Amino acid sequence: MTTVEATPSTGIRSTLLFNRNFLLLWAAYGVSAMGDHLSEMALLKTQDSLSADVDVTPLTARMTFMFFVPFFMLAPVAGALADRFSRRGLMVFSDVIRCVAMFFFASLIAVTQSWGSWGAFLPLVLIGAFAAIFSPARSALLPTLIRPDQLVRANGMIGGLGIIATMAAAKVGGYLAKFYEPTVAFRWDAASFVASAILLLCIHRPINPQERFTPARSTRTAGWNGFVRGFRYVRAHRRVRELLIIAALVWFCGPIVSSVIPAVVRDVYELRDYSNISSYRALLGLGFIIGAVTIMVLGDSLRGTVAIVIGMFGIAASMAVFAASALLPLVPSTAATVGGVGVVAAGAFGLTIMASFLSLLQRIVANRFRGRVFGVNDVCTTSALLIATGFLGLPNWTRLDRWVGWLLVTVAAVMLLSGCVTLTVHLRRSSLSPIITLAAVLNEFVAKFWWRLQRIGVCTVPRTGPVIVTANHVSTPDPSILSAAIYYRPLSFIIAAEYAGLPIVRSIVKLIDCIPVRREERDAGATKKAIHHLELGKALGIFIEGGIFAPDEPRRPKDGVAMLALRTGATVVPAYISGMRYHPGMIRGIIARHHARVRFGKPVDLTEFRNAPKNRETVRRATSKIYAAIQSLAPLDAAPTPMLPDAPIRRPEKTP
């Protein structure tokens, strides 16, 4: 019976841009993020921060510190609430309370300003408290509104918009602070939360039936037990713990960079204006736009861990450039240009890490625990943020602004070391050698990005033991496509000898231990090598048709797969490759765009042939069974495979 191939729809209406619920959540988050930061420049104006005798770095750090303190205190409870109550309802409630608070923000500042050097920033605690409730509810709601294969792009769009909105808020807030009284910015801030609440109320119920949220019947998820269970879940999952550590490192470095930007712009670049300071913060937003576009283009072509490592190294290099602009004796205009490049690049790589981290966490964590885990994530990230901003803002530093360049050097060093550690751990845990792992990552990227590979269903190839993976042969990239679909073990191939000697192919043949064979004659040496390869417990890929055929060209399955399987007892796993365009030339097949799909079947049961007479007829019957298993995996709309007359292979009837 032919299995229905459940490929995702490819029409334009299947994209995120035509998903009404996602677009509403996306827009609501962007407006809400803008509201969280629209009044920051106005708040700095109340502290006369442009004065030459005012240390602006501690002021900026204190502002960030007070906004994120509630995340540390309330995030676990907020995460438990997101697993107990309506996530959309919690977000709307948070927006309403923040709207009211911002409407009376000037009055709150007037009351608290006399309470000490931190007094003017105390009202931010109220805004941060309800932002802490909003955050895990939003992260937990997202996967219920989209398909799983859209998570990377969706997180890239949301993360990019959130930071872009934050940077736009800094730019608009700088303009308002320059020309108007702080109260004007506070009122616009309140209006932004009203807009966010209205957008959220327009979201329909979740559309993904596998992720549909059903509130827990027990109230334990919303109280202290929910708090504890969230931490227990994280403690029991090593991969989740490691992701949270990476997020904490990024959140430790990010506030330091944000805090030193005003001092660098004012003292090094000699641009003493609120709008100039906000412009450099807005450059981070430009970087996030670049990062978001990159993520949208790449999708899930890069493994999440690989994208995170690249992001760490990219931030380290970007911060080194930014630090150079502050430390080297450059002309202010030149330093401003160099620093701007570093800030933009840091934003692009930062979004790469954020989107990859969020999509990995959303995929790993079950829906019923997702709110609590994101609550724990908020605790970890805000703890790192509070440590960084507390270090800058709590002590009574004397002229801390003179050291901003070295603070940027520290950030670069931390991200470089983190990237090295993450890469080392990833390579050590891989079942492959480091060079094979790197080659596999590159191959997987090319297969997913350029040839648009998707694996349909699960991969049935055993992780250990001798195995033959056999498939139809459609185009030149088929070996790369098949290898990319089996990411956890190397797959060697029997390859035509005339191709094995080509310059680039020769290196690949040696790297993955391929076996060249002369197709025009019986190659006993190649057969012995293949048998030895399987006896060592390795995996071998063989295209049973023996070569690439035009779609209407008859072909006959070769007996090599059955012969090797019966000789060695190796497991035979059938696979079917579809979506590949036939090209007669080798190069044209490689450079062409495809929509590659791979489906693996259950291992073929050859027990009936193992005790049969060892003759050609037995091998031919085993070959027929293997080839029938391959053909049974074809999609329903695939044309029947033309066979040579003496090949008694009958394709099973298709059933819906």
Image (cartoon, grey):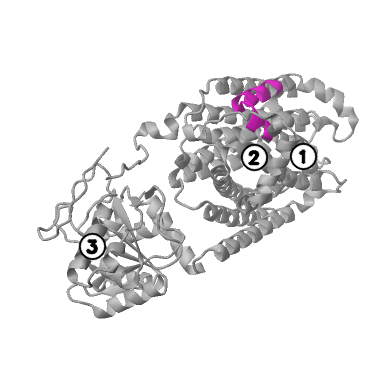
- Residue 101 image point, x, y percent: 74, 22
Position above or below: 104 against 12:
above
Query: Alpha carbon of mark 2 to alpha carbon of mark 3: how far?
Result: 52 Å
Left or right of 407 on screen, residue 84: left
- Residue 437 image point, x, y percent: 48, 64
Q: Nearer the viewer, mark 1 or mark 2?
A: 2
Amino acid type at circle 3 is Thr
Question: Can residue 173 be spotted in the picture?
Answer: no
Who's the residue at 86% across and 28% down the image?
A: 113
Which segment is the magenta one?
80-97
- Disc 1, SS: helix
Q: Earlier in the sequence, mark 3 or mark 1?
A: 1
Categorize mark 2 by other alpha carbons within 10 Å: few (<14), some (14-19), many (20+). Answer: many
Residue at numbered disc 3: 623
Residue at numbered disc 1: 65
Q: Nearer the viewer, mark 2 or mark 3?
A: 3
Who's the residue at 51% across and 65% down the image?
A: 431
Amino acid type at circle 2 is Phe
Q: Nearer the viewer, residue 656 or 331?
A: 656
Q: Nearer the viewer, residue 379 or 99?
A: 379
Residue at numbered disc 2: 374
Quadrant position of the N terminus in the picture: top left
Amino acid type at circle 1 is Phe
Query: Alpha carbon of mark 3 to alpha carbon of mark 1: how far?
Result: 69 Å
Position above or below: 376 against 342:
above
- Residue 263 image point, x, y percent: 74, 45
